[in-house]
Image: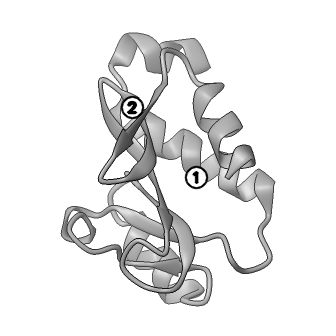
Amino acid sequence: MSRLRALCLALPEAEEKVSHGEPTWFVRKVFVMYANQHHDDRVGFWCAAPPGAQEAMVAADPAKYFRPPYVGHRGWLGVYLDVPVDWEEIAEIVTDAYRAIAPKRLIALLD
């Protein structure tokens, strides 16, 4: 989780708070939520995702990605961390989650 935390907190004005008993990262609103066996025996995170990303990623690799409960119907992506992880790919997913939620002025700081 420390690597996920570092990726999230490296983004402009990102903050960590505990929500629903789990570390959660906000930029005004939630963009990533850690899930340590939150609704199953798996470790991963749930995050905002660009339109269509959830469907494409889950279809391409259901061993790594899933539709999370509660927010999956809004297009959020679930990512398992208890499988071999490509941290460069995770960094891209976290950044995309941030871009989906952050105000335009903060997104501009990434470009």
Q: What residue lies at 47% left-to-right and 21% top-to-bottom?
A: 107
Query: Mark 1–mark 2 contact, CB under 8 Å?
Result: no
Q: Quadrant of the C terminus?
A: top right
Question: Is 17 located above or below residue 72 in the figure?
Answer: above
Q: Nearer the viewer, mark 1 or mark 2?
A: 2
* 38 left or right, relative to 93: left
Check disc 1 and report the residue beneath it: 93
**In front of the other: 42 or 52:** 42
Check disc 2 and report the residue beneath it: 26
Mark 1, Cα crowd under 10 Å, few <14 / some 14-19 / many 20+, is: many
Expressed as whole percent of the image width and height from the top left, the position of residue 14 reads 49, 23
Q: Is residue 44 visible?
A: yes
Q: CA distance from mark 1 to mark 2?
A: 15 Å
**In front of the other: 103 or 52:** 103
Question: Is 16 located above or below residue 70 in the figure?
Answer: above
Q: Amino acid at mark 2?
A: Phe
Question: Is 12 located above or below residue 93 in the figure?
Answer: above
Mark 2, Cα crowd under 10 Å, few <14 / some 14-19 / many 20+, is: some
Q: What residue lies at 65% left-to-right and 25% top-to-bottom?
A: 10
Question: Is 65 located above or below residue 74 in the figure?
Answer: below
Q: What residue lies at 55% left-to-right and 68% top-to-bottom?
A: 44
Image quadrant in which you'd find residue 83: bottom right
Q: Amino acid at mark 1?
A: Ile
* 68 left or right, relative to 99: left
